[in-house]
Amino acid sequence: MDVLEARKESYEKQIVQLKENHKRELSERDHNIKEYHRTLEEIEKKYSDKNVKITKANKKRVKEIVQNSKGNPDAVKQKIEELFDFSNFN
């Protein structure tokens, strides 16, 4: 019986850990989605000031940049400035 009880406790600990990991992953995903939308709004505003349309491919690329940045806003800013060549807009 002790072996069964030990296994049960072990499984319960694993379940708790899996739930915590899942919760953290969902939180990170939600953060990335918010960051994507915020970044896209900034880009659209900057482009609308210059009367330029953003393509679906560019929107997809922005999404990839935000996802791959792992929460680093400086990396997002740099890559987006490179993608859209914002240096020419200033």
Image (tube, rainbow, N blue to C red):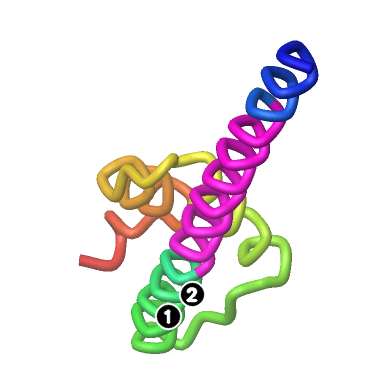
Image mark for residue 41: 1
As helix, strand or loop, the secondary structure at mark 1 comes to: helix
Asked if 25 appears above or below 53 in the picture, the reply is: above
Q: Residue at x 48, y 53 (%)?
A: 28
- Of residues 75 and 49, the one nearer the viewer is 75
**Residue 87: x %, y % from top left:** 28, 55
Confirm whether the magenta stretch covers residue 34: no
Q: Residue at x 38, y 49 (%)?
A: 76
Q: Residue at x 51, y 80 (%)?
A: 52
- Of residues 30 and 84, the one nearer the viewer is 30
Tell me the quarter of the image containing the C terminus: bottom left
Q: Quadrant of residue 10?
A: top right
Total count of labels: 2
Image mark for residue 37: 2
- Of residues 70 and 59, the one nearer the viewer is 70
Asked if 27 appears above or below 50 in the picture, the reply is: above
Region rendered in magenta: 11-33
Which amino acid type corresponds to the residue marked 1 in the rendered image?
A: Glu
Image side of residue 63 versus residue 3, left or right:
left
**Residue 57: x %, y % from top left:** 72, 62
Q: Are the two marked residues, 2 and 1, in contact with CB atoms closer than 8 angstroms?
A: yes
Image mark for residue 82: none
As helix, strand or loop, the secondary structure at mark 2 comes to: helix
Q: Residue furthest top?
A: 3
Name the magenta segment's main secondary structure.
helix
Asked if 87 appears above or below 1 in the picture, the reply is: below
- Of residues 41 and 24, the one nearer the viewer is 24
Image side of residue 88 versus residue 31, left or right:
left
Which amino acid type corresponds to the residue marked 2 in the rendered image?
A: His
